Structure formats: structure tokens, C-alpha cells
Image: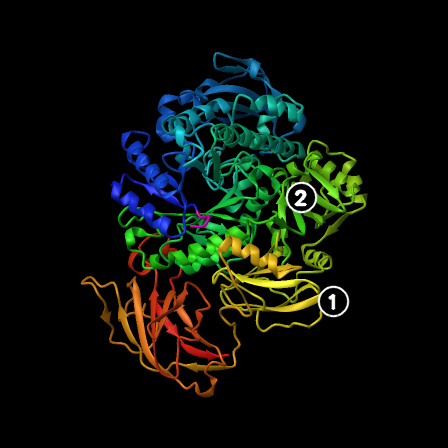
């Protein structure tokens, strides 16, 4: 087996040894050389039966030369400590600051307040602050805030209320509140608490398998750790109640946090805490920014960073992902506060694609079992954000892992898997974590399951997808990523004012085939970022311009770095308008300097494509194709272009311009075929000066690589080294349309269903092609359908001179084809077209097509499948023979 880039989740429920070994063997035989062992949950996790099963799994993996990763908890999200954290180390659980308040109108001399009665068990008062209210509403007068904690005695506050409307804020340290699901999880912003979690999970596995660490055991997988101070994707300081709910908001807290906040804000924290809940002033927004700034840094250093350090010290790696959904990557609640800071401690960047990305869902909202999802973010922002970190952080070495395919339901077959693979890979992902292999009988947990104890109708063709995915990931791990632009990550802007998310700029660029990376302000510092020949350089990446999404407010350090970079010659494009504020610097002259700085310009999103297009000389696409995605890499074989048509319906027909002296080789990863032309070709057609044009045609679901360099030999050597390619062909394996002559097969079909209870196959009383998933036919049938027909071809003098192609038309959804008893090929997605030259002959021929649908028809009674439309079943045609 060549190196695999696929690392699936392998769920554990305490199955017998033979079942575990069978599942591992099936993975190994189908292009997978490593997997992640996950308790889902195992009934005896961290006890005898867990270690017994893990012994079996590790031994079998070792025998086969496979690698093992270990999921770092008994269930997701990581941080529960298998329930042992609460019982063994209750002090290590999450801590929050909670607010309660009493409103009073003064003057009231000699007044007192029974604040101890607000406390629940194990809660304590950490601060008491008074603030004058504006107009008896929630807004506060900035200069009025006063810390009156010292006036409390034995749980009673003695305070003479001055004239006016006042609010007495009680700030309580508590373990109560927040997301119910994660209430017993570790405090992620306190390293002493995190060390307890490491002791329970990581140390326990190390003590038992230390000899395998760094060899068979490659590392740990951390899944969706979060703040969990609210069950929400939208939680920020300033939200008076948990988003969409009525419970008072609570905010993460730790022992170090007050000191850090006071250092950043320059004030006693006792005077600032009210602003986490209310206040409309600029100063209130400054404090909220400072709070998010500090807790997001602590999450990165104290939790994931701490675990990553432990892993590397024990010769293994840490991979995984946080919750990014609906923009939560920059927020509290389900989020981690700041994606790039949270993921800094991992050895690869990572993301999760669970029911969120679909063909054609490019903007707006759509309803799913997880609620309404922001298609704009998922389609354009999520994969690009994750791969950007892998490009920026030297520790990641360009690697981005993607947990993918989970919870799409049984409707997700190899066709959608192929589309999703293209979608994330063309945005820079190069390691895939399929979700999931489950050895449990008829498991209803978040389908699909790929093997499904042999019951998945498409399992026989899984290797076609895995071979293709491995080739993609191998090529997209070669060389160096090339991007034209950098887009500033928007988190800091979101924390304290109006803002636009980074994905708006990414979409504007991507639809014009302009690649970019998302860059956080933390990476713009002098020790990380410089300007060379007018380009922003970070790690080994370089960008022709930096795009700053609209931000009402930015940190002072960010503005200073923008000025420095512009002074050094970098073009900075600020979207829509300049910032209005700098946090904690309302009267700063830096904004005036920003407005007058050379190389800094205000632009609209509509302007962006044209700005970058005029800078592109080679690798240019003619025309407008918003559904065509492109990635570039610099490799030993020259510049590598990866083209993906993401439309389900539209064909890309365009010209691709390359340097006049450069050679161009195409590589079809599905066919594993290297060839010179992409027919029809426009050799000799000249574009702009110094360019030659080639016609590029991609039908729906198609992808194609192009090697552009000085010689063909280097591309051939690279393809040979990676994939065993030995020959360079003149033409692609499958000729795109249009073609010169076609003949539709109009004869009767013999149609059989294959997985019938009594075994064998059963012929249907049907002789024509149609959708079988309709009333009166097979609306709930999942399995294989075999189609047989006879046809005649009049070749005459054409034999040996023309090529013949078989086009199956519409298929739902995999097709394996035999012509005259000889295997012609497998198609798992459109176009369902095969080269059958040499297989057919003059006179009578026989065609056999086996179609496999998904288990959605049989097992679609679940929250995932019922939420999306299901496709037809069978071969719909028309079936044609094409002469070329």
C-alpha cells in the first residue's frame, strides 16, 4: 500500500475480537493505513474491557503495519475526563463568573442589602460593583462605576445609595450555569485543572502503551473542546442572557484572569466587570474586547497548548478540531474564542464537516438537524480558515486534517463523498478523517457508516473513492501553496463593534479563481511577518496584498502593524471604510495616519477580483465561473493547478492561459492518468503577449490537475513516484462532450435486484429505464440493481480508426460496467462515461451495468435523512454509444 492520507474514526462499543479485526482488515484492504480509536462510548472505558479491546486493536494494527490514534475522552466533546474528573478532582471543573443585581434609586442613607441570599451552594462573592444607570435602562454611566466589595460584612452590603438610579452588581464565582451537556467538564483556562484531565486520559494510556508511543501509536485526537458557558454559537460578552434563552449569562473564569484583565485594561477589574453584561459605551466595548482577548489566549495556552506540549514530550502528536459552526470559532459558548489561538498547540490544523456543506448551498441559511446553518461561512470560510493555519504555522508543516462525512445520513453515498472531498481539498485540506467505521450491528448513530458490517451497498466501490482521495491529498501535500492575497481574520473586530466576517472577501476572490489565506493579526507581528518585494511574507507563504474586512474597531497593535507593513511597501485594501475606533484609544492619531498612509486604500468587495486579475499573467481563467475553484502549488514538477467544478448542473468551458514556453501536462486523479491535451485543445492560439491558451472543460463533479513547467519529464517523474504512473497519454481517458456521433441504446433491458432475502437475484417485470424509487416499484429498496441489454454496432470501415465511449446518462448512484463479459470500469459520480474502445465489436454486443444506491431508502428513518431530499434509484439513462 502506498502512503494513505485517510485516517477514519473507528468506533468502539465492546464488540468481539473477530468483529474488531474484520473492521480493521476491511479498512486496510481499501486504502487506509491508520485510524482513530473512539469510544462511542465504550461501556467499560478506562477499565478492563477497554484495555482488552485496545490491546487487540493495537496488536492487529501492528501486524498489518497500520498506525493508531486515540480519541482523548469517552465521548465528545473532549474535556469530560470519562466522568472521573467530577468524582476525583471536582475542583478542576469549569468556573464561571455569574452576575446578579439589585436596582435601587437614591438617595438612600443607611441602606443595606442581603447579598448572601443570592448565593447557591459552593458559590462565593468575588466583587460587588455599583453603577449609575442611564434613564433607568441597561446602559451605564462610565464614570460612575465604583467597587464597593469592601462594604460587605457577613453577607450583608452596607452602602448609602447616592442620588439617582443605581444598579448594585453582585459577581459570583460559580460552577453552575452554562451548557448543561458540558457542565462537568474541565476548566479550559486553568492549567492546573487541565493537568488533571491529562492525568486521567493521556497519562493512563501512556502508562499502558509507552513502548508503542511514537511507533504504532501516533497520537491523540481532541474533539470539539469549548468554553461551554452557553449552549449557543453566538455567545459574546454583552449578551444579557444566553443567546435565544432566558438564563442569565455566565462567563469563563480562572485564577489568572483578573490579573491579566487589569494589565490589559489598566483598571481595577472590580470596576469593569459590569461591562461584560451591559453598557453601550465605547469603553464597555473595549472591556468586552479585552475579556475575549484574554480568555481566548488562555484557552489556547492552558488547554490545547498544554496538551500539545505533553504529547510532543511523549513522542506523539495532537490533532483534532474545535467548534467552528456558524462563526462560533470567534466566540464563547460552543466556541473557543479565536480559532487560530485555540489550534496553535496542535500539530496539524483541523476542522469538522458534519452535514454543513452541500453542493449549491453557497449562501444564506438552510435548515438542518443542527438548526439553521450559515451556508456563507461553511461553504466559503470554514475549509479556507483551517488550511490557512497549516500554511502559517511552521509546526503544522502544511497539514490540515478534516473530520468529514459524519451525520449526513445514509443518503450520503460515494458521489457526495467525492464532491465533498474535492470541495475541501481544493481549499487546502490534505488529510481526511472519515466519520465513521462502526462495527455495531445496524448502528443508528450519525450515519453513514462505510462498511456497516458488509451491508452498505456501495462498500464494494469504496476503494475507488479512497484511491482518488489519497491521490488528491498526496499531490496537495507536495511543494508550497501559492496564494495571491491574505485576508485578515475578523475575530478582534467582532468582539467590540460592527464588523464583516472574513468569508465575504474569501467568496469574492474564490468566485474569480483567486486563492487566499486567512491571516490573524497575531501573525502580522515583526517576528512573523515581513514585506519582501512588495509581498507579505509569513512562514514560507507570500501574498500580493492584505485585505482587511470592514471593522468598526481594531486593536492598537493591529493598526500599528498595518501601518508598518504599508510603509514597507505592502498594499493594504480596507473594505468599505476605515475603522472608526481603536480599542482603549478613542482619540488616537493612528486612525488619521491610517487614512493618509500610502499603500492603504479603501475598496469594495466588487473591486477585489479585478484588482488581482490584472496582476495575474500566467494561469489565468477567461470568463466568469463562480462554481470553478482553483488551487495552486509550487512543486518539483513546476506550478501545479487543481481545478474543481463544484456545480451539480453546469459545465465549465473556458480557456486557461500559460506561459508560451511552458509545457502543460494534465493529470486525472480519478483515472490515475497523465496526458498532454485536454480536448478540444487550442494549441497555437495566442492570448496576451507571452501566453499560450488551452481549453479547459470540466463537467459537473469533475476535477483535474495541470502541471505547468519547463519540461514534461519532471511531472512524469513526480506522478510515477507518487502513483506509479508509467505512461503519458495524448488524450484523457474519457472524452468530454460534445462528440461527433451518438447512438442511443433503445432495446429492452433485463433488470434484476440482487440483495433479496432468499439470496441470488430477482428479475423485475420491467424492461425500460426509469426511477425505481416510486410507488409500485422499489421506493424503500437499498441495494444493487443489475441491468442487462443487447445492442448492435455497425462499425464498417471505422473499426480501428475511431474511439468508442459508453455514456450511461443519469445514474443513482454508482455504476460498474461490463461489455461482452469484460470489465469496463466503475463510476461513482458524474459523468458516467467510459472508454469502451476495444471492448465492443461489430454486430451484437452485451452490456451489463450494476448500480448501487445508498441505505437511505431502507434506513432513512433518522433525523438526518428526513431533513434533506432523497435522490432516485437506478439507471435512468439515456444510455448512448459515442463515436469520436
Which residue was labeled with disc 1?
688
- Which one is nearer the viewer's eye here, 574 or 348? 348
Is residue 703 highlighted in magenta?
A: no
Residue 239 at least partly seen: no
Q: Earlier in the sequence, mark 2 or mark 1?
A: 2
- Which one is nearer the viewer's eye here, 869 or 222? 222
Q: Is residue 625 left or right of residue 232?
A: right
Label disc, if present, on residue 401 of the rendered structure: none
Residue 561 at least partly seen: yes
- Residue density around tag 1, few if under 14, some if 14–19, many if 20 or more, within 10 Å: few
Q: From this view, report whether residue 574 is shown above or below residue 624.
A: above
Q: From this view, report whether residue 703 is shown above or below residue 168.
A: below
Q: From this view, report whether residue 99 is shown above or below residue 463.
A: above
Identify the residue shown where x is 51% and y is 79%.
884
Q: From this view, report whether residue 503 is shown above or below residue 676.
A: above
Q: Identify the magenta region.
A: 1-6
Is residue 4 highlighted in magenta?
A: yes
Residue 69 in the image: state x and y as whole percent: 41, 38
Identify the residue shown where x is 28% and y is 63%.
780
Q: Dot 2 lies on which element?
A: loop
Which residue was labeled with disc 2?
551
Residue 373 in the image: state x and y as whole percent: 48, 50
Identify the residue at the far top of this view. 153
Residue 799 in the image: state x and y as whole percent: 45, 83
- Residue density around tag 2, few if under 14, some if 14–19, many if 20 or more, within 10 Å: many
- Which one is nearer the viewer's eye here, 620 or 74? 620
Q: Dot 1 lies on which element?
A: loop
Amino acid at each position: 500500500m502506498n502512503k494513505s492520507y485517510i485516517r477514519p474514526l473507528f468506533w468502539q462499543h465492546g464488540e468481539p475480537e473477530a468483529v474488531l479485526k474484520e473492521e480493521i482488515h476491511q479498512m486496510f484492504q481499501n486504502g487506509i493505513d491508520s485510524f482513530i480509536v473512539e469510544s462511542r462510548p465504550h461501556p467499560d472505558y478506562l477499565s478492563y474491557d477497554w484495555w482488552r479491546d485496545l490491546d487487540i486493536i493495537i496488536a492487529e494494527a501492528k501486524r498489518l503495519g497500520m498506525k493508531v490514534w486515540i480519541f482523548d475522552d469517552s465521548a465528545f466533546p473532549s474535556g469530560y475526563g470519562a466522568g472521573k474528573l467530577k468524582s476525583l478532582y471536582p475542583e478542576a471543573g469549569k468556573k464561571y463568573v455569574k452576575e446578579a443585581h439589585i436596582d435601587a434609586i437614591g438617595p438612600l442613607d443607611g441602606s443595606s442589602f442581603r447579598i448572601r441570599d443570592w448565593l447557591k451552594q459552593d458559590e462565593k462573592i468575588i466583587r460587588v460593583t455599583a453603577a449609575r444607570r442611564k434613564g433607568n435602562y441597561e446602559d451605564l454611566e462610565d464614570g460612575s462605576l465604583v467597587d464597593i466589595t469592601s462594604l460587605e460584612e457577613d453577607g450583608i452590603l452596607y452602602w448609602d445609595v447616592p442620588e439617582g438610579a443605581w444598579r448594585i452588581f453582585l459577581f459570583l464565582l460559580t460552577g453552575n450555569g452554562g451548557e448543561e451537556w458540558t457542565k462537568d467538564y474541565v476548566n479550559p483556562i486553568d492549567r492546573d485543572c487541565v493537568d488533571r484531565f491529562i492525568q486521567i486520559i493521556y497519562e493512563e494510556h501512556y502508562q499502558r502503551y509507552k513502548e508503542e508511543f511514537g511507533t504504532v501509536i501516533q497520537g491523540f485526537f481532541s474533539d470539539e473542546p469549548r468554553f461551554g458557558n452557553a449552549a449557543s454559537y453566538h455567545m459574546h460578552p454583552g449578551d444579557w442572557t444566553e443567546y435565544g434563552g432566558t438564563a442569565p449569562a455566565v462567563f469563563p473564569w480562572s485564577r489568572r484572569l483578573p490579573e491579566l484583565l487589569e494589565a490589559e485594561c489598566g483598571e481595577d477589574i472590580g470596576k469593569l466587570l459590569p461591562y461584560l453584561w451591559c453598557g453601550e459605551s465605547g469603553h464597555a466595548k473595549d472591556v468586552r474586547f479585552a475579556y475575549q482577548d484574554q480568555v481566548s489566549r488562555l484557552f489556547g495556552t492552558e488547554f490545547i497548548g498544554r496538551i500539545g506540549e505533553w504529547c510532543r514530550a511523549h513522542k506523539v502528536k495532537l490533532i483534532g478540531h474545535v467548534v467552528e459552526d456558524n462563526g462560533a470559532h470567534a466566540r464563547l459558548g460552543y466556541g473557543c474564542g479565536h480559532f487560530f489561538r485555540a489550534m496553535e498547540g496542535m500539530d496539524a490544523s483541523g476542522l469538522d464537516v458534519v452535514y454543513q456543506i452541500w453542493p449549491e448551498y453557497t449562501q444564506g441559511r438552510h435548515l438542518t438537524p443542527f438548526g439553521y446553518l450559515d451556508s456563507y461561512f461553511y461553504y466559503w470560510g470554514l475549509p479556507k480558515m483551517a488550511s490557512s493555519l497549516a500554511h502559517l504555522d511552521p509546526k503544522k508543516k502544511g497539514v490540515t486534517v478534516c473530520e468529514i462525512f459524519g451525520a449526513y445520513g445514509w443518503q450520503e453515498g460515494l458521489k457526495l463523498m467525492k464532491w465533498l472531498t474535492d470541495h475541501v481539498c481544493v481549499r487546502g485540506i490534505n488529510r481526511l478523517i472519515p466519520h465513521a467505521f462502526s462495527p455495531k450491528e445496524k448502528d443508528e448513530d450519525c450515519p453513514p457508516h462505510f462498511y456497516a458490517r458488509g451491508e452498505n451497498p456501495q462498500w464494494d466501490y469504496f476503494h475507488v473513492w479512497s484511491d482518488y482521495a489519497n491521490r488528491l491529498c498526496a499531490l496537495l501535500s507536495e511543494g508550497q501553496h501559492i496564494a495571491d492575497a491574505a485576508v485578515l481574520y475578523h475575530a478582534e473586530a467582532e468582539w467590540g463593534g460592527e464588523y464583516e466576517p472574513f468569508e465575504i472577501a474569501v467568496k469574492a476572490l474564490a468566485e474569480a479563481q483567486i486563492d487566499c489565506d486567512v491571516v490573524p493579526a497575531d501573525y502580522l507581528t515583526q517576528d512573523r511577518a515581513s514585506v519582501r518585494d512588495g509581498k507579505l511574507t509569513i512562514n514560507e507563504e507570500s501574498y500580493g496584498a492584505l485585505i482587511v474586512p470592514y471593522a468598526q474597531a481594531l486593536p492598537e497593535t493591529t493598526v500599528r502593524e498595518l501601518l508598518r507593513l504599508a510603509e514597507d511597501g505592502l498594499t493594504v485594501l480596507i473594505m468599505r471604510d476605515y475603522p472608526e475606533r481603536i480599542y482603549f484609544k478613542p482619540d488616537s492619531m493612528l486612525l488619521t495616519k491610517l487614512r493618509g498612509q500610502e499603500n492603504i486604500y479603501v475598496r469594495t468587495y466588487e473591486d477585489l477580483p479585478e484588482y488581482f486579475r490584472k496582476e495575474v499573467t500566467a494561469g489565468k481563467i477567461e470568463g466568469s465561473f463562480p462554481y470553478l475553484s482553483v488551487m495552486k502549488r509550487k512543486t518539483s514538477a513546476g506550478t501545479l493547478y487543481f481545478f474543481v467544478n463544484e456545480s451539480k448542473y453546469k459545465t465549465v468551458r473556458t480557456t486557461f492561459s500559460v506561459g508560451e514556453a511552458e509545457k502543460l501536462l494534465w493529470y486525472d486523479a480519478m483515472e490515475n492518468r497523465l496526458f498532454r491535451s485536454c480536448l478540444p485543445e487550442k494549441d497555437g492560439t495566442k492570448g496576451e503577449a507571452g501566453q499560450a491558451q488551452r481549453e479547459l472543460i470540466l463537467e459537473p463533479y469533475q476535477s483535474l490537475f495541470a502541471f505547468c513547467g519547463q519540461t514534461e519529464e519532471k511531472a512524469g517523474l513526480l506522478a510515477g513516484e507518487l502513483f506509479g504512473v508509467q505512461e503519458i497519454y495524448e488524450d484523457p481517458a474519457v472524452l468530454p462532450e460534445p462528440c461527433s456521433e451518438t447512438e442511443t441504446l433503445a432495446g429492452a433491458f433485463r433488470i434484476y435486484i440482487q440483495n433479496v432475502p432468499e439470496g441470488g437475484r430477482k428479475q423485475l417485470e420491467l424492461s425500460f429505464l426509469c426511477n425505481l424509487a416510486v410507488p409500485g416499484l422499489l421506493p424503500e429498496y437499498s441495494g444493487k440493481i443489475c441491468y442487462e441489454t443487447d445492442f448492435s454496432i455497425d462499425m464498417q470501415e471505422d473499426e480501428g480508426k475511431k474511439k468508442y465511449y459508453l455514456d450511461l446518462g443519469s445514474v443513482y448512484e454508482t455504476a460498474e460496467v461490463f461489455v461482452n463479459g469484460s470489465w469496463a470500469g466503475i463510476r461513482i459520480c458524474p459523468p458516467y462515461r467510459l472508454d469502451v474502445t476495444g471492448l465492443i465489436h461489430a454486430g451484437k454486443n452485451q452490456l451489463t451495468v450494476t448500480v448501487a444506491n445508498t441505505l437511505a431508502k431502507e434506513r432513512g428513518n433518522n433525523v438526518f435523512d428526513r431533513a434533506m431530499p432523497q435522490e432516485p434509484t437506478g439507471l435512468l439513462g439515456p444510455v448512448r454509444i459515442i463515436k469520436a
